[in-house]
Image (cartoon, rainbow, N blue to C red):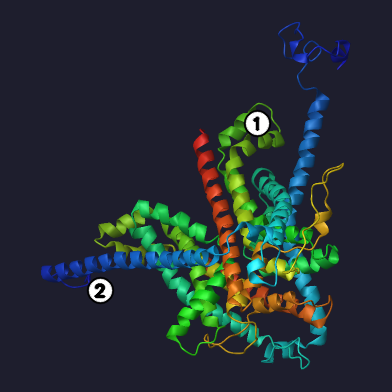
Amino acid sequence: MRAREARPRAAPRYVSEPKKPSLLSDTDFTPVLSRSALRYRKMRDRVIELLLLAAGLIAVFTTLAIVAILLIESSAFFKHVSIVEFLTDTMWTPLFADAHYGILPLVAGTLTTTVVALLVAVPIGTLIAIYLSEFAPTKVRETVKPILELLGAVPTVVYGYFALTMVTPALQRLIPDLPGFNMLSAGLVIGLMIVPYVSSLSEDAMRSVPRYMREGSYAMGATRLQTALHVVVPGAFSGLAAAFILGISRAVGETMVVAIAAGMQPNFTFDPREPAATITAYIVQVSLGDLPHGSIGYQSIFAAGLVLMLMTLVFNVIGYSLTRRFREAY
Amino acid sequence: MSGTSMTAPYLDPKHVREGLSRRKLLDQVFVIVGLIVMLACLAILAVLFIDLVIDGSERFSWDFFTNFASRRAERAGILAAWVGTSLIMIVTALCAVPVGVAAAIYLEEYAPKNWFTAIIEINVTNLAGVPSIVYGLLALGLFVYQFNLGQSIAAAGLTLALLILPIVIVATREAIRAVPNAIREAAYGLGATRWEVTKDHVLPYSTGGILTGMILGLSRAIGETAPIITIGALSFIAFLPESPFKSEFPFISFGWLDDPFTAMPIQMFNWVSRPDPAFQANAAAAGAILLGMTLLMNGVAIWIRYRFRKKINW
């Protein structure tokens, strides 16, 4: 330190002539970084690490905040409404004078659109995935995969427009007395919307089945189809289950398509030809109005949101246990 | 397939040959079915998109971009919507990208392998699967009423930032993981601290991946409707937020953060919900523009990924 202060400030340090080519003592050689600079660098590293950790913790806080907000606002809701009524009443009319608070119609609407969507997405998505992974020439796969990923980015409100203005009129030609708002059209479009997700993820899962398993099957004289159905699909089952679960979560949480095309009237039915509201559509409907903070209607969307979260949680737990049970280790 | 009679005491060659040709036929049939289903799916989506653009094309004009929403369909435009969307995207990008990249750096470069890190990782994975409308409820309870941001651009931007945070984190982690360890070890060997290694070596090499993740996240945010309806976006706005640029010092103002807003997907949803077919054309036009924006952003992301991959030689 003393050596450095003795020198004129203007001279750049690295030009100063070392007296002897010795690296061992810092009295005759000025290190480029002094001890205090080193300490500063270590301090800075520590501070930066804490900042980065804080950023990582935001993810944890977000989850906690979601759970906390849903529970707090729902508990205010359940002070007015008994849980028994909430789970057993078959009418959902929180905004009417004759208020009923039965979540069943909304759950029924959500399940119906989800089942219709999955009836479309799972077979088609799996078929496309098997084709792309086991049969398609490389060129086809390299072209189709990015297109599938691109389709996943299309805003859902655009799909809602398709359902209302294109798919419903087409369906009405097949089923003449189909109402303008119906769950069938919404479900079909959600299904079409999640086909790219399901097929892209399933394809990834099937591609990760090692090559030697296929070669073993071919060596036994199996065709590509036999190999695909009896070796690759079972081998990739955990990945396929994960893809389907993601599809279910998307379908359950899908909002805009049902809000636009399925109508917003709560209707306790499992008939996809009828109009009905889903949990998500109800939340949108309430948000479009101007409900005062703290009113029962305001609290009811958080109770509905809590049910939605619990439903996706259940599906995810099922998916997780399926994945664990059928995981193949190579 | 029952054609292979493995358990039969002896194999009749004729029987084997029949089974073989049947299996080969099935194989061919599947190729054709698979191809047809895939093409049919892509064709249906293509028809829908083309139809959307055709329906909307009659409304494409300069006025459509410079007019406010109106009760008369032919005079209505998307001025407030695209200005609102742009301002929200600025807030979202400024919040989500630094936080997301920082969280990813922590998880990849700093985090020790313990239960605490595992909790953060599980949280990031789970957040990616939370329905977007739940983020809307979170924002309604937290940003709008607890933090008193009201139904403002700031609240909307923060909501979408939380929504795309997992996307940014996952993309950045993948980009960072692709940097070979030899690079890090060389830098450590020269006495660099962890932050210096990260800042001077890891981040420059993973810029392409980070940018890709950022654009993909923003393209998701730009089309999200449900969460910003939930926090109370207005669909009929005939004024612009306060301008971010001022003619006198300090030239920049943040008054717009507090302003009420509308956004492209909200405007489209509002028009779709009207029975009048004239408004449906407006909805189609807005939808086509929205679609064009997301596809363009995704195209840019793919291009950036490709370019950076070509530029780097390990």
Camera-side residue of A173 and B108: A173
Q: Quadrant of the N terminus of chain A?
A: top right
Camera-side residue of A171 and A270: A171
A72 over B61 or under it: above or below? below
Q: Residue under circle 1?
A: B188
Disc 1 chain ID: B
A2 over B30 or under it: above or below? above
Q: Mark 2 Cα within 10 Å, few/some/many (few <14, many 20+)?
A: few
Q: Quadrant of residue A227?
A: bottom left
Q: Residue under circle 2?
A: B2
**Percent coordinates x, y for residue A124 in the rendering:** 42, 70
Q: Mark 1 Cα within 10 Å, few/some/many (few <14, many 20+)?
A: some
Q: Residue furthest bottom?
A: A98
Visible in this render: residue B131? no
Going by the image, does B202 lie left or right of B87?
left
Residue drawn at (85%, 66%), measured in percent from left and top? B146
Mark 1 lies on a secondary structure that is helix
Same subunit: marks 2 and 1: yes
**Percent coordinates x, y for residue B306 in the rendering:** 50, 43
A46 over B228 or under it: above or below? above
Q: How many marks?
A: 2
Residue drawn at (52%, 48%), measured in percent from left and top? B302
Residue drawn at (73%, 70%), measured in percent from left and top? B230
| Type of amino acid under label 2 | Ser
**Percent coordinates x, y for residue A23 in the rendering:** 72, 14
Marks 2/1: CA–CA distance: 61 Å
Q: Residue furthest top?
A: A19
